[in-house]
Amino acid sequence: MTNVINITKESGIPLIGLAFIGIIARNSNNLIQVRTTTLCNMNCQFCSTDAGIISKFHKTQYIVDLEYMLEYLRELANYFDKDLKIHIDSVGEPTAYPKLINLIKGIRKIKNYKDISMVTNGTLLTKEKIKELEEAGLTRINLSIHSLNILKSQELFGSTIYNIKKIIDTIKEIKKTKIDIYLAPVYIPNVNENDVDDIIELAKELDCKIIIQKYEHHKYGRKIKIKEPTYFNFYNKLKELEKKHNIKLRYAYSELETEKVKSLPVKFKKNEKVSVEIKAPGWFENQSIAVSRNRALTIINHKYNKNENMKVRILSTKDNVYLTEPVKQ
Protein backbone atom coordinates (compact mmCIF):
# COMPACT_ATOMS: atom_id res chain seq x y z
CA MET A 1 0.00 0.00 0.00
CA THR A 2 1.31 3.45 -0.96
CA ASN A 3 2.06 5.91 1.84
CA VAL A 4 1.44 9.57 0.89
CA ILE A 5 3.32 12.20 2.90
CA ASN A 6 2.21 15.84 2.93
CA ILE A 7 5.21 18.15 3.10
CA THR A 8 4.09 21.23 5.01
CA LYS A 9 5.95 23.93 6.88
CA GLU A 10 5.11 22.06 10.07
CA SER A 11 6.75 18.89 8.72
CA GLY A 12 10.12 20.57 9.15
CA ILE A 13 11.29 19.35 5.72
CA PRO A 14 12.94 22.13 3.66
CA LEU A 15 12.00 22.33 -0.02
CA ILE A 16 15.61 22.55 -1.20
CA GLY A 17 17.92 19.54 -1.13
CA LEU A 18 15.93 16.64 -2.61
CA ALA A 19 15.90 15.55 -6.26
CA PHE A 20 12.41 14.05 -6.28
CA ILE A 21 10.33 16.77 -4.57
CA GLY A 22 10.57 20.48 -3.84
CA ILE A 23 12.67 23.05 -5.72
CA ILE A 24 15.81 22.60 -7.83
CA ALA A 25 17.93 25.49 -9.14
CA ARG A 26 20.50 23.94 -11.48
CA ASN A 27 23.61 25.22 -13.23
CA SER A 28 23.42 28.80 -11.95
CA ASN A 29 20.75 29.72 -14.51
CA ASN A 30 17.39 31.39 -14.05
CA LEU A 31 15.26 28.28 -14.69
CA ILE A 32 13.74 27.01 -11.44
CA GLN A 33 12.30 23.48 -11.35
CA VAL A 34 9.22 23.10 -9.15
CA ARG A 35 8.20 19.60 -8.08
CA THR A 36 5.01 19.51 -6.02
CA THR A 37 4.19 15.80 -6.20
CA THR A 38 5.68 12.41 -7.04
CA LEU A 39 2.30 10.90 -7.96
CA CYS A 40 1.71 9.61 -11.50
CA ASN A 41 -1.33 8.08 -13.22
CA MET A 42 0.63 6.26 -15.95
CA ASN A 43 3.25 3.49 -15.94
CA CYS A 44 5.50 4.35 -18.87
CA GLN A 45 7.50 1.39 -20.14
CA PHE A 46 10.71 3.43 -20.13
CA CYS A 47 10.10 5.74 -17.13
CA SER A 48 13.47 6.98 -15.89
CA THR A 49 12.19 7.25 -12.30
CA ASP A 50 9.98 4.12 -12.05
CA ALA A 51 7.01 6.35 -11.19
CA GLY A 52 3.38 5.26 -11.46
CA ILE A 53 0.78 3.01 -9.92
CA ILE A 54 2.82 -0.20 -10.31
CA SER A 55 6.16 1.23 -9.22
CA LYS A 56 8.64 -1.43 -8.14
CA PHE A 57 10.85 0.80 -5.98
CA HIS A 58 8.60 3.55 -4.58
CA LYS A 59 6.20 2.76 -1.74
CA THR A 60 6.10 6.33 -0.43
CA GLN A 61 4.76 9.34 -2.36
CA TYR A 62 4.81 13.06 -1.55
CA ILE A 63 2.66 16.17 -2.01
CA VAL A 64 3.90 19.67 -1.11
CA ASP A 65 1.57 22.09 0.64
CA LEU A 66 0.64 24.97 -1.69
CA GLU A 67 1.35 27.86 0.70
CA TYR A 68 4.64 26.30 1.78
CA MET A 69 5.80 26.08 -1.84
CA LEU A 70 4.75 29.68 -2.58
CA GLU A 71 6.56 30.89 0.54
CA TYR A 72 9.79 29.31 -0.72
CA LEU A 73 9.32 30.74 -4.21
CA ARG A 74 8.86 34.24 -2.78
CA GLU A 75 12.12 33.85 -0.85
CA LEU A 76 13.93 32.70 -4.01
CA ALA A 77 12.59 35.68 -5.97
CA ASN A 78 14.04 38.01 -3.33
CA TYR A 79 17.35 36.15 -3.28
CA PHE A 80 17.94 36.16 -7.04
CA ASP A 81 16.31 39.57 -7.71
CA LYS A 82 16.27 38.80 -11.46
CA ASP A 83 13.71 37.65 -14.00
CA LEU A 84 13.19 33.93 -13.41
CA LYS A 85 11.53 31.09 -15.28
CA ILE A 86 9.48 28.44 -13.49
CA HIS A 87 9.28 24.92 -14.92
CA ILE A 88 6.69 22.74 -13.20
CA ASP A 89 7.90 19.19 -13.67
CA SER A 90 7.91 16.02 -11.63
CA VAL A 91 9.34 12.55 -11.24
CA GLY A 92 5.64 11.69 -11.77
CA GLU A 93 2.84 13.72 -13.40
CA PRO A 94 2.55 17.45 -12.51
CA THR A 95 -1.19 17.64 -13.27
CA ALA A 96 -1.77 15.07 -10.50
CA TYR A 97 -1.12 17.94 -8.06
CA PRO A 98 -4.60 18.89 -6.79
CA LYS A 99 -3.84 22.62 -6.41
CA LEU A 100 -2.03 23.15 -9.72
CA ILE A 101 -4.20 26.09 -10.83
CA ASN A 102 -3.74 27.90 -7.52
CA LEU A 103 0.00 27.21 -7.68
CA ILE A 104 0.26 28.94 -11.06
CA LYS A 105 -1.93 31.83 -9.90
CA GLY A 106 0.24 32.20 -6.80
CA ILE A 107 3.48 32.22 -8.81
CA ARG A 108 2.04 34.89 -11.11
CA LYS A 109 1.65 37.21 -8.10
CA ILE A 110 5.35 36.96 -7.20
CA LYS A 111 7.71 39.51 -8.68
CA ASN A 112 10.38 38.32 -11.12
CA TYR A 113 8.62 35.14 -12.30
CA LYS A 114 8.02 35.85 -16.00
CA ASP A 115 7.53 32.46 -17.66
CA ILE A 116 5.75 29.41 -16.25
CA SER A 117 6.09 26.16 -18.20
CA MET A 118 4.92 22.65 -17.39
CA VAL A 119 5.52 19.11 -18.61
CA THR A 120 2.58 16.70 -18.76
CA ASN A 121 1.38 13.47 -20.33
CA GLY A 122 -1.88 15.29 -21.07
CA THR A 123 -4.20 12.56 -19.80
CA LEU A 124 -5.69 14.62 -16.94
CA LEU A 125 -6.27 17.74 -19.04
CA THR A 126 -9.81 18.68 -20.04
CA LYS A 127 -11.14 21.58 -22.09
CA GLU A 128 -12.09 23.34 -18.86
CA LYS A 129 -8.73 22.65 -17.20
CA ILE A 130 -6.82 23.98 -20.21
CA LYS A 131 -8.82 27.22 -20.05
CA GLU A 132 -8.10 27.48 -16.32
CA LEU A 133 -4.38 26.99 -16.96
CA GLU A 134 -4.42 29.76 -19.55
CA GLU A 135 -6.28 32.15 -17.25
CA ALA A 136 -3.96 31.29 -14.35
CA GLY A 137 -0.95 32.36 -16.43
CA LEU A 138 0.71 29.19 -17.76
CA THR A 139 2.87 30.11 -20.75
CA ARG A 140 4.03 26.75 -22.13
CA ILE A 141 3.24 23.03 -22.08
CA ASN A 142 5.73 20.30 -23.01
CA LEU A 143 3.47 17.36 -23.87
CA SER A 144 4.86 13.82 -23.73
CA ILE A 145 3.65 11.83 -26.75
CA HIS A 146 5.45 8.76 -28.11
CA SER A 147 3.20 7.15 -30.74
CA LEU A 148 0.00 7.94 -32.65
CA ASN A 149 -0.89 4.25 -32.84
CA ILE A 150 -3.64 3.34 -30.36
CA LEU A 151 -2.16 0.06 -29.10
CA LYS A 152 1.49 1.09 -29.20
CA SER A 153 0.81 4.35 -27.35
CA GLN A 154 -1.00 2.39 -24.64
CA GLU A 155 1.90 -0.05 -24.46
CA LEU A 156 4.50 2.73 -24.14
CA PHE A 157 2.48 4.57 -21.48
CA GLY A 158 1.81 1.29 -19.66
CA SER A 159 -1.94 1.86 -19.47
CA THR A 160 -4.98 0.64 -21.41
CA ILE A 161 -6.85 3.84 -20.49
CA TYR A 162 -4.38 6.00 -22.43
CA ASN A 163 -6.36 7.45 -25.34
CA ILE A 164 -4.24 8.96 -28.12
CA LYS A 165 -7.32 10.33 -29.91
CA LYS A 166 -8.21 12.29 -26.77
CA ILE A 167 -4.61 13.51 -26.50
CA ILE A 168 -4.72 14.86 -30.06
CA ASP A 169 -7.99 16.64 -29.23
CA THR A 170 -6.25 18.05 -26.14
CA ILE A 171 -3.40 19.39 -28.28
CA LYS A 172 -5.95 21.09 -30.54
CA GLU A 173 -7.63 22.68 -27.51
CA ILE A 174 -4.28 24.00 -26.24
CA LYS A 175 -3.63 25.49 -29.69
CA LYS A 176 -6.79 27.61 -29.25
CA THR A 177 -5.22 29.31 -26.23
CA LYS A 178 -2.25 31.61 -25.65
CA ILE A 179 -0.30 28.68 -24.17
CA ASP A 180 2.68 27.66 -26.31
CA ILE A 181 2.95 23.91 -26.85
CA TYR A 182 5.89 21.63 -27.59
CA LEU A 183 5.38 17.97 -28.47
CA ALA A 184 8.04 15.96 -26.63
CA PRO A 185 8.44 12.37 -27.83
CA VAL A 186 11.19 10.08 -26.59
CA TYR A 187 13.03 8.50 -29.51
CA ILE A 188 13.49 4.76 -28.83
CA PRO A 189 15.47 2.96 -31.58
CA ASN A 190 13.70 -0.07 -33.09
CA VAL A 191 10.61 0.68 -31.01
CA ASN A 192 9.01 3.95 -32.12
CA GLU A 193 11.20 5.23 -34.95
CA ASN A 194 8.32 5.33 -37.45
CA ASP A 195 6.06 6.78 -34.77
CA VAL A 196 8.42 9.73 -34.30
CA ASP A 197 8.04 10.44 -38.03
CA ASP A 198 4.26 10.53 -37.53
CA ILE A 199 4.56 12.84 -34.52
CA ILE A 200 6.75 15.26 -36.47
CA GLU A 201 4.12 15.41 -39.21
CA LEU A 202 1.41 15.96 -36.58
CA ALA A 203 3.44 18.84 -35.14
CA LYS A 204 3.70 20.40 -38.60
CA GLU A 205 -0.02 19.87 -39.26
CA LEU A 206 -1.09 21.47 -35.96
CA ASP A 207 1.67 24.12 -36.00
CA CYS A 208 3.31 22.87 -32.80
CA LYS A 209 6.96 23.02 -31.89
CA ILE A 210 8.67 19.71 -31.19
CA ILE A 211 11.58 18.59 -29.02
CA ILE A 212 12.71 14.98 -29.45
CA GLN A 213 14.29 13.40 -26.38
CA LYS A 214 16.93 10.68 -26.25
CA TYR A 215 16.01 7.38 -24.61
CA GLU A 216 18.34 6.56 -21.73
CA HIS A 217 18.76 3.68 -19.31
CA HIS A 218 18.58 4.65 -15.63
CA LYS A 219 19.64 2.41 -12.76
CA TYR A 220 16.27 2.48 -10.99
CA GLY A 221 14.11 3.29 -14.01
CA ARG A 222 12.03 0.93 -16.12
CA LYS A 223 13.97 -0.27 -19.14
CA ILE A 224 13.19 -1.39 -22.66
CA LYS A 225 15.50 -4.15 -23.86
CA ILE A 226 17.39 -2.22 -26.50
CA LYS A 227 20.88 -0.82 -26.74
CA GLU A 228 20.87 2.77 -25.51
CA PRO A 229 21.74 5.13 -28.40
CA THR A 230 24.89 7.22 -28.12
CA TYR A 231 24.57 10.99 -28.28
CA PHE A 232 26.49 10.90 -31.56
CA ASN A 233 23.96 8.53 -33.12
CA PHE A 234 21.04 10.41 -31.60
CA TYR A 235 22.10 13.78 -33.03
CA ASN A 236 22.79 12.16 -36.39
CA LYS A 237 19.24 10.80 -36.29
CA LEU A 238 17.88 14.28 -35.53
CA LYS A 239 19.88 15.66 -38.45
CA GLU A 240 18.40 12.97 -40.71
CA LEU A 241 14.86 13.75 -39.50
CA GLU A 242 15.38 17.49 -40.01
CA LYS A 243 16.30 16.90 -43.63
CA LYS A 244 13.47 14.40 -44.18
CA HIS A 245 10.73 16.58 -42.69
CA ASN A 246 12.17 20.05 -43.30
CA ILE A 247 11.86 21.02 -39.63
CA LYS A 248 14.22 22.22 -36.90
CA LEU A 249 14.93 19.58 -34.24
CA ARG A 250 18.38 20.47 -32.87
CA TYR A 251 18.80 23.36 -30.46
CA ALA A 252 21.94 25.02 -29.14
CA TYR A 253 22.19 25.79 -25.42
CA SER A 254 22.12 29.50 -26.28
CA GLU A 255 18.65 29.02 -27.79
CA LEU A 256 17.16 27.85 -24.49
CA GLU A 257 16.76 31.50 -23.44
CA THR A 258 18.11 31.07 -19.92
CA GLU A 259 20.34 33.57 -18.16
CA LYS A 260 23.13 33.11 -15.65
CA VAL A 261 22.29 34.05 -12.06
CA LYS A 262 24.17 33.72 -8.80
CA SER A 263 24.10 30.23 -7.31
CA LEU A 264 22.26 29.23 -4.19
CA PRO A 265 24.75 28.73 -1.36
CA VAL A 266 25.92 25.12 -1.01
CA LYS A 267 25.58 24.24 2.67
CA PHE A 268 27.87 21.19 2.78
CA LYS A 269 31.15 19.89 1.39
CA LYS A 270 31.67 16.48 -0.15
CA ASN A 271 32.85 13.90 2.43
CA GLU A 272 31.92 16.26 5.29
CA LYS A 273 30.41 14.54 8.33
CA VAL A 274 27.19 16.22 9.45
CA SER A 275 24.69 15.80 12.29
CA VAL A 276 21.13 15.44 10.98
CA GLU A 277 17.60 14.78 12.22
CA ILE A 278 15.46 12.17 10.44
CA LYS A 279 12.08 13.55 9.31
CA ALA A 280 10.45 11.09 6.89
CA PRO A 281 10.96 7.88 4.92
CA GLY A 282 12.75 8.34 1.60
CA TRP A 283 11.36 7.78 -1.88
CA PHE A 284 13.20 4.47 -2.09
CA GLU A 285 13.06 1.71 0.50
CA ASN A 286 16.01 1.81 2.91
CA GLN A 287 16.31 5.56 2.49
CA SER A 288 15.33 8.43 4.76
CA ILE A 289 14.81 12.18 4.48
CA ALA A 290 16.89 14.15 6.98
CA VAL A 291 17.36 17.83 7.78
CA SER A 292 20.40 19.96 8.59
CA ARG A 293 21.30 23.64 7.99
CA ASN A 294 17.88 24.36 6.48
CA ARG A 295 18.38 21.78 3.74
CA ALA A 296 16.78 18.40 3.15
CA LEU A 297 19.10 15.44 2.58
CA THR A 298 18.58 11.90 1.34
CA ILE A 299 20.25 9.17 3.40
CA ILE A 300 20.87 5.92 1.53
CA ASN A 301 21.23 2.51 3.21
CA HIS A 302 19.19 3.62 6.19
CA LYS A 303 15.99 2.24 7.70
CA TYR A 304 13.62 5.09 8.61
CA ASN A 305 13.34 5.91 12.32
CA LYS A 306 11.38 9.10 12.98
CA ASN A 307 13.16 11.94 14.83
CA GLU A 308 16.37 9.93 15.08
CA ASN A 309 19.51 12.05 15.33
CA MET A 310 22.61 10.69 13.64
CA LYS A 311 25.74 11.54 11.69
CA VAL A 312 26.01 11.19 7.93
CA ARG A 313 28.73 11.65 5.33
CA ILE A 314 28.00 13.88 2.35
CA LEU A 315 28.33 11.95 -0.92
CA SER A 316 27.11 14.57 -3.41
CA THR A 317 26.15 18.26 -3.37
CA LYS A 318 25.51 18.90 -7.08
CA ASP A 319 22.78 21.50 -7.77
CA ASN A 320 22.08 21.77 -4.02
CA VAL A 321 20.76 18.20 -4.04
CA TYR A 322 22.29 16.30 -1.14
CA LEU A 323 22.95 12.56 -1.07
CA THR A 324 24.42 11.07 2.10
CA GLU A 325 25.18 7.80 3.86
CA PRO A 326 25.31 6.92 7.57
CA VAL A 327 28.64 7.32 9.36
CA LYS A 328 29.64 3.95 10.76
CA GLN A 329 30.03 4.13 14.51
Image (cartoon, rainbow, N blue to C red):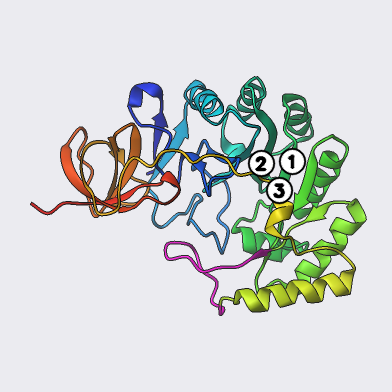
Image point (57%, 46%), residue name? 41
SS under mark 3: strand
Q: Is any part of residue 190 visible from this angle? A: no
Q: What is the three-letter code of the residue carrying label 3? A: Asn
Assess whether mark 1 and mark 3 are in contact (beta carbons under 8 angstroms): yes
The residue segment tinted magenta is 213-227
Q: What is the three-letter code of the residue carrying label 2? A: Met
> For residue 17, which quarter of the picture?
top left
Assess whether mark 1 and mark 2 are in contact (beta carbons under 8 angstroms): yes
User: Dot 1, crowdedness within 10 Å: few (<14), some or many (≥20)?
Assistant: many
> For residue 120, which quarter of the picture?
top right
Q: Name the residue under label 2.
A: 118
Relative side of 194 to 28, left or right: right
Which label sits on residue 113?
none
Residue 150: percent from the left, percent from the top? Answer: 75, 61
Viewer-proximal residue among 17 and 79: 79
Relative side of 218 to 77, left or right: left
Q: Is any part of residue 109 visible from this angle? A: yes
Relative side of 76 to 119, left or right: left
Q: What is the three-letter code of the residue carrying label 1? A: Arg
Q: Please say whether residue 108 is one of the residues in the magenta stretch.
A: no
> For residue 231, which quarter of the picture?
bottom right
Q: Quadrant for the N terminus, please.
A: top left
Assess whether mark 3 and mark 2 are in contact (beta carbons under 8 angstroms): yes
Q: In this view, does 77 lie above or below 34?
A: above
User: Which of pointers 2 and 3 lies earlier in the amino acid sequence?
Assistant: 2
Residue 215: percent from the left, percent from the top? Answer: 60, 68
Viewer-proximal residue among 320 and 199: 320
Q: Mark 3 points at which residue?
A: 142
